[in-house]
Image: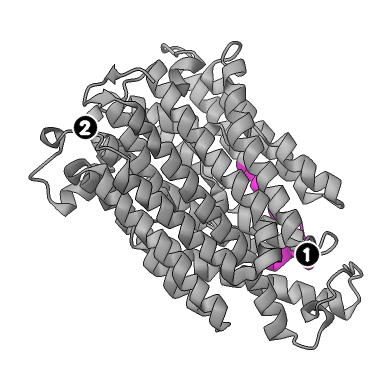
């Protein structure tokens, strides 16, 4: 990689270690999500129905006859797991909602690496605490303590906001930023896909405890890369000073409230961002429960395969297709295609009756997440270089809020409808994707008379969804 002088410093090949950091971190968090979600279902099966066939070693039967006792027990476990997911979502998101609004401004003041080390250290601690809970086989509600502690570092989205700000520090909009952000996108996709692919084998081979130990090890390796190899993104003289914590927090939201020529653009972009994240972030936990339920009754290996295929399609293939789509469409058009793709995938998932239909879902929805990174990019381009950390901190707060609402809402809908129509919750997600598409159409109409760049201008700053949403298991 050639050196490139940005507004704040020189882009060096060593800055690419941030991709390694994210790859290892996403591997850790995705594995954590898959392990925790499946362990919770297994624990509840044994706790609620210790003498049932659901708790025995012979789980090959998958009875979908609604009049059987097995079906009623399985539905009860699904509802209990969904209820627990609501508590877990609150534990890991409410503190992060406050902290992430501060950490971005603090990273502008003290540097990105220090905040990254803190956040990743708490991820490692989360994996270790969960390992102890699994090993001792104590009540799963102790998980809430470990997720609360983890959230004190800003959580997953807080960490991502620092990474996005880091890349904004060392690049100018253009080919170099496209290269670096694409590298981050690829690392996120590879880390998530690898975790999904190997998770089933790890769980089947060594059990949930050692799989959770692997979470700690991956997070520890990610932290080592930050400490040993990742350079500072900004020279000391470029760090902000003399700002209070309150000022740091308020700086994350001033873009949307202070009168300026760009204010309406900020507001419209953040509304689109919120609606799109609501349509995506709450799906992962529900998908795992959906796959473990009749008529699928998937094993850990199958759940892992689906996760690997889904993340690969959305975060690698989807991003790669941007380069093709940019030759023919404007940014709003591609975002609309993204909304339609996500809506179609959710509808197919809602009415899936066999494995083939479920595995078609990530194929149909591989463009579904593009609207999120494109919106991040638009916001980044509107913002001065010395306020990127504050901007992405505010975006992280919105994303955490959406994650909170999406997960709680999805779990509540699933609890209410799983007995009558198990896939109804995905129709709700389809409706949210439809809303996002309508908002994008409004955005296109409003901006029709103004200068609108081609997609390459928007995808200069293309950043990750999350994913992980799958973390939101996150």
Q: Which residue is drawn at 48% across and 16% down?
A: 456
Tell me the element at label 1: loop
Establish if 315 lies above or below 10: below
Q: Report the magenta residues as a range.
A: 415-432
Which residue lies at the image location 83% right of the left edge and 45% below the top edge?
Answer: 357
Q: Residue 293: which disc?
A: 1
Question: Label 2 vs label 1: CA separation?
Answer: 49 Å
Relative side of 192 to 373, left or right? right
Where is residue 12, by image quadrant? top left
Q: Which residue is drawn at 76% across and 47% down?
A: 349
Q: Is residue 140 above or below residue 148?
A: below
Crowd around label 1: few <14 · some 14–19 · many ≥20 (10 Å): many
> Observer-nearest residue: 124 or 71?
124
Mark count: 2
Type of secondary structure dominating the magenta stretch: helix
In the picture, measured across the screen, residue 195 lies left or right of residue 249, that is right
Q: In the rendered view of the protein, which quadrant contains the N terminus? A: top left
Residue 407's place in the image compared with 268, above or below, is below
Query: Does 142 appear in magenta?
Result: no
Please state the horizontal and vertical placement of residue 364, each as a whole percent of the image. 74, 35
Q: Is label 2 in a helix, a strand or a loop?
A: helix
Picture coordinates of residue 176 (x, y %)? 38, 19
Kindly identify the residue that appears in the image at 62 percent across and 42 percent down: 311
The quarter of the displayed image where residue 79 is located: bottom right
Q: Is residue 427 visible?
A: no
Outermost residue toward the left in this view:
242
Residue 37: image x %, image y %? 62, 65
Please identify the quarter of the rendering in which residue 334 is found.
top right
State which tag comes first along the sequence, 2 or 1: 1
On the question of residue 208 being in view, the answer is: yes
Residue on which the image places disc 2: 386
Residues 464 and 300: in front is 300
């Amino acid at each position: 990689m050639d050196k490139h002088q940005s507004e704040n410093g020189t882009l060096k090949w060593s800055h690419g270690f941030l991709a390694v950091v994210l790859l290892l971190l996403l591997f850790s968090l995705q594995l954590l999500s898959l392990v925790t979600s499946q362990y919770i279902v297994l624990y509840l099966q044994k706790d609620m129905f210790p003498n049932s066939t659901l708790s025995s070693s012979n789980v090959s039967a998958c009875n979908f006859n609604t009049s059987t006792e097995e079906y009623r027990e399985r539905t009860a476990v699904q509802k209990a797991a969904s209820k627990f997911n609501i508590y877990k979502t609150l534990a890991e998101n409410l503190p992060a909602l406050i902290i992430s609004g501060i950490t971005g401004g603090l990273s502008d003041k003290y540097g990105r690496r220090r905040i990254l080390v803190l956040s990743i250290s708490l991820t490692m601690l989360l994996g270790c605490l969960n390992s102890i809970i699994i090993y001792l086989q104590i009540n799963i509600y102790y998980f809430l303590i470990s997720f609360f502690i983890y959230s004190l570092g800003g959580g997953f989205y807080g960490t991502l906001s620092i990474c996005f700000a880091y890349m904004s520090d060392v690049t100018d909009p253009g080919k170099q930023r496209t290269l670096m952000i694409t590298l981050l996108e690829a690392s996120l996709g590879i880390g998530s896909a690898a975790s999904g692919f190997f998770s089933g084998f790890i769980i089947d081979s060594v059990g949930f405890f050692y799989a959770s130990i692997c979470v700690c090890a991956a997070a520890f390796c990610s932290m080592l890369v930050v400490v040993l190899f990742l350079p500072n993104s900004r020279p000391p003289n470029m760090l902000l000073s003399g700002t209070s914590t309150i000022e740091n927090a308020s700086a994350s939201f001033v873009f949307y409230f202070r009168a300026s020529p760009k204010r309406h653009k900020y507001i419209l972009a953040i509304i689109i961002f919120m609606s799109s994240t609501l349509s995506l972030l709450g799906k992962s936990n529900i998908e795992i429960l959906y796959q473990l339920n009749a008529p699928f009754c998937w094993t850990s290996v199958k759940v892992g395969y689906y996760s690997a295929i889904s993340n690969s399609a959305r975060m690698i293939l989807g991003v790669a297709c941007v380069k093709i789509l940019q030759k023919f469409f404007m940014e709003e058009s591609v975002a609309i295609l993204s909304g339609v793709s996500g809506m179609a995938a959710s509808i197919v998932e809602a009415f899936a009756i066999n494995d083939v239909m479920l595995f078609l879902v990530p194929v149909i929805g591989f463009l579904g997440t593009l609207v999120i990174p494109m919106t991040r990019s638009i916001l980044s381009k509107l913002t001065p270089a010395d306020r990127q950390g504050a901007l992405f901190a505010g975006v992280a707060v919105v994303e955490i809020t959406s994650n909170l609402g999406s997960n709680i809402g999805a779990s509540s809908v699933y609890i209410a409808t799983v007995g009558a129509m198990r896939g109804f919750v995905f129709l709700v997600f389809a409706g949210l994707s439809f809303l996002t598409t309508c908002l994008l159409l409004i955005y296109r109409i409003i901006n029709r008379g103004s200068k609108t760049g081609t997609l390459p201008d928007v995808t200069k700053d293309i950043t990750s969804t999350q994913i992980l949403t799958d973390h939101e298991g996150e």
